[in-house]
Amino acid sequence: MPQEFVQTHAQEDAAAQAEQDAAAVQSTAAQAETAGDALDSVLDDIESVLETNAEEYVSSFVQKGGE
């Protein structure tokens, strides 16, 4: 009888650990998606600035008269 209790208890611990691991993976995936969305937003802002001011942006790096 005690052996059955030990095995059942061990199985419950394994199941609980598996649930915790699954929750951790989901949390990490959600954080990665949020970070990816934030990065996409920043890149979109940069792209829009370059589309509207590309010539001005590039000309600011061009050397003039031996600078």
Image: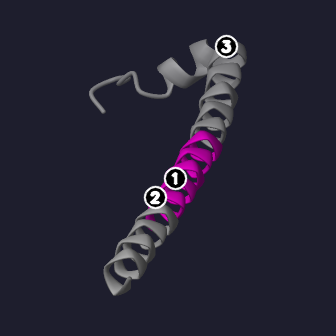
Give the mark nearer the N terminus: 1 vs 3.
1
Tell me the number on the disc at residue 59. Answer: none
Label 2: few (<14), some or many (≥20) within 10 Å? few
> Label 3, label 2: how many angstroms apart (C-alpha)?
49 Å
Q: Residue furthest front?
A: 1
Give the mark nearer the N terminus: 3 vs 2.
2
Question: In terms of depth relative to the viewer, which is nearer, 25 or 49?
Answer: 25
Q: Which residue is mark 2?
A: 18
The quarter of the picture where residue 47 lies is top right
Looking at the rendering, in which quadrant would you find the C terminus? top left
Q: Secondary structure at mark 3?
A: helix
Q: Secondary structure at mark 2?
A: helix
Q: Which residue is mark 3?
A: 51
Q: Which residue is mark 1?
A: 22
Question: In terms of depth relative to the viewer, which is nearer, 35 or 54?
Answer: 35
Q: Amino acid at mark 3?
A: Glu
Q: 28 left or right of 10? A: right
Q: Amino acid at mark 1?
A: Ala
Q: 53 left or right of 67? A: right
Label 3: few (<14), some or many (≥20) within 10 Å? few
Residue contact between numbered discs 1 and 2, judged by CB atoms under 8 Å: yes
Residue at the spot x=62%, y=20% of the render? 50
Query: What is the chief secondary structure element of the magenta stretch?
Result: helix
Q: Which residues are magenta?
A: 17-35
Against 51, residue 3 (above or below) is below
